[in-house]
Image: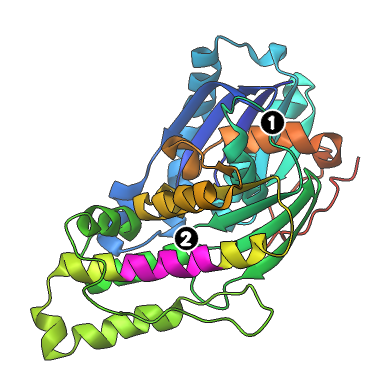
Amino acid sequence: MLLLGIETSCDDTATAVDRDGRFVLSNVSTNQDAFHAKYGGIVPEIASRRHVELLSAAVEDALERASVRLDELDGIAVTAGPGLVGSLAVGVASAKALAFAAGKPLYAVNHLHGHIFAGFLEAAAEPEYPLLALLVSGGHSQLVHLDGPTRMHVIGRTHDDAAGEAFDKTARLLGLPFPGGPQIDRLSATGDAHAFDFPRHRPERGSLDMSFSGLKTSVKYFLDTPAGAAARAADVAASFQAAVVDVLMDRVERAAARAPYAAVVLSGGVAANSALQAAFIKWGARSGVPTIVPPPRYCTDNAAMIAAAADRQGSTLRVDPKRLSADPNLPFSFSTGGL
């Protein structure tokens, strides 16, 4: 399968060409951080306008870099949701037009499923099932059990802020620019992760759910004290980051104790965090469970992962180009495309 992937769920205009859902022939992404930084977060109207300006050129660029013509593709995969409705609409409209004009199959992909299959890109071999996926991003933090590419369900989720959202909000408290996750990661490298004992959310008995809102609030209250005002920002950042990592890894350990997983996948934008990656890999080595971490370029939003998901979920995602519409609230639970 030779697929063109299109991803415009938020502020990254991304296109890619994959072969067999694993070999990435091209991966194009235009970041909009500079346009949103002065607002301290993503402005939906700006994001959608930039997608309109950039997407056609990004598609041409991906095809050219892969040395592939549109008529040589086996299909087109596009993020149908969840995400910002204006951003999604640009990608979906472009994919529909391309699929209809070229007579190619169109696959409607769930953005979150794409993140899970990002771990399979450029992998030496296809992982076996059942899999456990820790999906952590700016909008979502959840544990997913997979019995197969189209058989998956959420077994743990955040009750409030996602981990990435907590990173962004805490970075703002520390006066760091947007996006906050990479800023805290870099600052933490020079800080003491044991300097401050910020709270770790403890789940109810038998639950794999998590919470980060209380942690963010604890940092805020601490910074308002004389001790917080005098504290090194690097120590606060490192201590906060350690608390987030501890909560995430605690849930992975609890989930892995319940079922004999063949492998555990780390995915989503926060998967690029160096402390989380180190803890995840260390846990895998200690527990004997194979761990899969995507290369950094596939942790954040990208189109290669969308094509990878379409390749594995196949005909169940195929849709009529004339009927597909963007769904900003697309549920995680798997549903067929309707053809």
- Residue 248 is one of the magenta-drawn residues: yes
Dot 2, crowdedness within 10 Å: few (<14), some or many (≥20)?
A: some
Would you identify the image quadrant in which residue 257 lies? Answer: bottom right
107 on left or right of 299: right
Q: Nearer the viewer, residue 195 or 23?
A: 195
Of the numbered discs in the image, which one, if any, rests on residue 276? none
Dot 1, crowdedness within 10 Å: few (<14), some or many (≥20)?
A: few
179 on left or right of 98: left
Q: Nearer the viewer, residue 285 or 49?
A: 285
Q: CA distance from mark 2 to mark 1?
A: 27 Å
- Residue 206 is one of the magenta-drawn residues: no
Among numbered discs 2 and 1, the one appearing first in the sequence: 1
- Residue 298, percent across and down? 49, 38
* Magenta segment boundaries in residue numbering: 240-250
Q: Which three-letter amino acid code belongs to the residue tagged 1?
A: Glu
200 on left or right of 125: left
Q: Which three-letter amino acid code belongs to the residue tagged 2?
A: Gly
Give the structural element (helix, strand or loop) at label 2. Answer: loop
Residue labelled with disc 2: 138
